[in-house]
Amino acid sequence: MTKLKYKDLKLEDGYAEPLLRRHGDELYDNVWKDFYTGYTSNMDEEQIINYADKQCHMAATNMLNAAAALRIDSCPIGGFDPQSVLDILKIDKQKFAISLLIPLGYRVDEQAIKHRRAFEDVVSFID
């Protein structure tokens, strides 16, 4: 699985508007249009890509949890050559960027026991 992120997330680019209209034109006209435009209109290309990257990671977290619930293993990969992946998969580089790769599958052998530090050793609560 390859998680793609749209690079054209400004309202005038056409991708976001149908998503914002999915709950009706009235809500779009009175709330979402100004809210979203106010958020993204001042972003430069790097900020838009960073925003899209974060959105993909949040969606990927849900996908990884759903896969685990179905006993499907996964391993999100962030260290890869994005341009090579775009070339291999023949993906439009002008429209998309790759956020992460997620191999999914069923394990052949049982997983070895993990030896981890105690929760108390790695987590601190701040009052």
Image: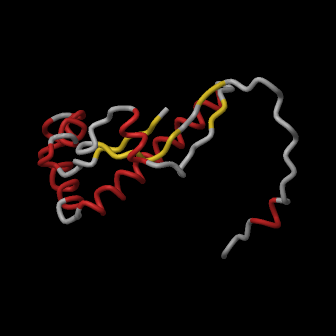
At a point 70% along the width and 70% down the height, the residue shown is 125
Q: Is 40 situated left or right of 84 in this image?
A: left
With 64 as the anchor, is 43 left or right in this view?
Answer: left
Q: Which quadrant does the C terminus fall into?
A: bottom right
Q: Which of the 4 image quadrants contains residue 42? A: bottom left
Q: Residue at x 27, y 38 (%)?
A: 92
Residue at 12% from the left image edge and 45% from the top image edge = 29
Q: Is residue 107 left or right of residue 103?
A: right
Position of residue 126 measured from the top left corner of the image (x, y, whole percent): 67, 74
Q: How many marks?
A: 0
- Residue 24 versus residue 4: which sits nearer the camera? 4
Locate residue 72: give its quadrant.
Answer: top right
Colour theme: secondary structure
Residue 99 lies, in percent from the top left, at 43, 47
- Residue 11 at x, y percent in the picture: 16, 49
Q: Residue furthest bottom?
A: 127
Where residue 46 appears, as percent x and y from the top left, is: 30, 62
Q: Is residue 55 left or right of residue 108?
A: left
- At a point 54% along the width and 43% down the height, the residue shown is 61
